[in-house]
């Protein structure tokens, strides 16, 4: 009876072949439970990916075709270290006579509040940022 309940509830269906002995029916019940658990974990992973995509919807659109861009990737770009500060100042220095490139920082980790504050207050106003 348990086999028929699990097969019906899980919507697996009875199919053309079905187990006839008690041990095979018990085995199939465990297989169905494992399948339902696996399906649930996969649905959870898909929902998490959709959530991450929705949360990180930032997009880089170049200002101009002639403007170069530099991409910084990894966990090191999320904090305002002396190295990051020197890098940003060097790349965005407008006194050199060269058009400053767009600097795009990508990380799965959230950006440090200090870096966000620095980007909003210390960098030139023409620098666009999405943090």
Image: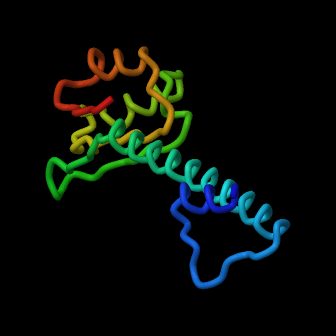
Quarter location, residue 33: bottom right
Q: Residue furthest right?
A: 23
The foreground one among 129 and 103 is 129
Quarter location, residue 32: bottom right
Where does the C terminus fall, quadrant-wise?
Answer: top left
Image coordinates of residue 17 in percent, x first then y, are: 65, 83
Q: Residue furthest left?
A: 64
The foreground one among 38 and 76 is 38
Q: Residue furthest bottom?
A: 16
Image coordinates of residue 117 in percent, x first then y, are: 34, 15
The foreground one among 118 and 89 is 118
Where does the N terminus fall, quadrant-wise?
Answer: bottom right
**Residue found at x 35% / y 42%:** 104
Please say if 35 is above or below 87.
below
**Residue found at x 82% / y 66%:** 22
Image coordinates of residue 77 in percent, x first then y, are: 49, 33
Please say if 101 is above or below 33.
above
Q: Residue furthest front?
A: 1
């Amino acid at each position: 009876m348990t086999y028929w309940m699990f097969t019906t509830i899980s919507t697996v269906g009875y199919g053309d072949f079905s187990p006839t002995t008690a041990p095979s029916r018990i085995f199939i019940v465990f297989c169905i439970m494992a399948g339902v658990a696996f399906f649930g974990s996969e649905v959870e992973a898909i929902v998490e990916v959709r959530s991450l995509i929705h949360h990180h919807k930032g997009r880089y659109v170049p200002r101009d075709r002639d403007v170069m861009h530099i991409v910084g990737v990894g966990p090191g770009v999320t904090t305002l270290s002396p190295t990051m500060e020197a890098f940003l100042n060097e790349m965005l220095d407008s006194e050199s006579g060269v058009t400053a490139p767009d600097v795009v920082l990508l990380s799965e980790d959230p950006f440090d509040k200090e870096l966000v504050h620095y980007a909003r207050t210390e960098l030139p106003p023409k620098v666009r940022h999405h943090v």
